[in-house]
Image (spheres, grey):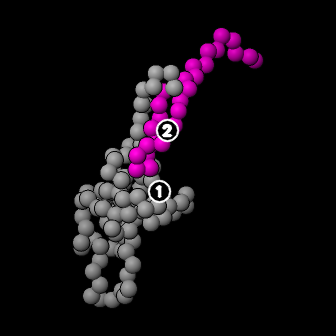
Amino acid sequence: MACKNVVLLCTPMLVLPGENGAQYVMDGDTGERVFYEPLLTIGSLVKCRIARVWPVYLELEIVDINGHVTTVPYKAIYRPNFVEQDVNAVFLDNTYKHGADFEGKVISYGDNMGVVVGMV
């Protein structure tokens, strides 16, 4: 069964490099900037909101990448290097609170482990 009278609306789009590793998507016909989204790369400075606090790691939501607000809902974790776990160890759930701000640097990211953030 074939479709008749189908009109495909194709607008040429251009992806242009931006500042600080961001990309602009421009409408090729009008030259209008459609959106501006910073790219998440290793070494990016990020501002996060703490989504959940566990004793040994934090679940984060990235809200800012390299000084630019992001609309992509990136999830990340912060897991500090514990030298020794003993009775006197300071756990993260006593230090950080849900909804607080957290600043860090992207250490690594991947499909299976998500974004890993370290301290600046």
Q: Residue at x 50, y 61 (%)?
A: 109
* For the residues bearing labels 2 and 1, Cβ distance under 8 angstroms: no
Instruction: Look at discs 2 and 1 and give the one toward the viewer.
Output: 2
Residue at image point 29% right, 73% down: 92
Residue type at numbered disc 1: Thr
Residue bounds of the magenta highlight: 1-27
Query: Residue 18 lies in magenta, yes or no?
Result: yes
Question: In the structure shown, which secondary structural element does the residue marked by tag 2 occupy?
Answer: strand
Whether residue 113 is visible, yes or no, is: yes
Say whether disc 2 or disc 1 marks the residue closer to the N-terminus.
2
Query: Identity of the amino acid at label 2?
Result: Leu
Q: Which SS class for mark 1?
A: loop
Give the side of residue 93 with respect to residue 32, left or right: left
Image: 91 above or below 85: above
Within the image, what quadrant is residue 76 found in?
bottom left
Q: Marks 2 and 1, how far apart in space?
A: 17 Å
| Quarter location, residue 11 | top right
Q: Residue at 36% across / 59% down in the picture? A: 45
Where residue 91 appears, x then y in whole percent? 29, 77
Foreground pick, 17 / 88: 17
**Disc 2: which residue:** 16
Q: x and y percent of residue 13 in the render?
A: 53, 30
Relative depth, front residue between 76 and 20: 20
Residue 41 numbered mark, or none: 1
* Residue 10 point in image, percent of width and height: 58, 22
Magenta stretch: includes residue 62: no
Q: Quadrant of residue 55?
A: bottom left
Nearest to the observer: residue 113 or residue 66: 66
On screen, 52 above or below 84? above
Q: Is residue 73 visible?
A: no
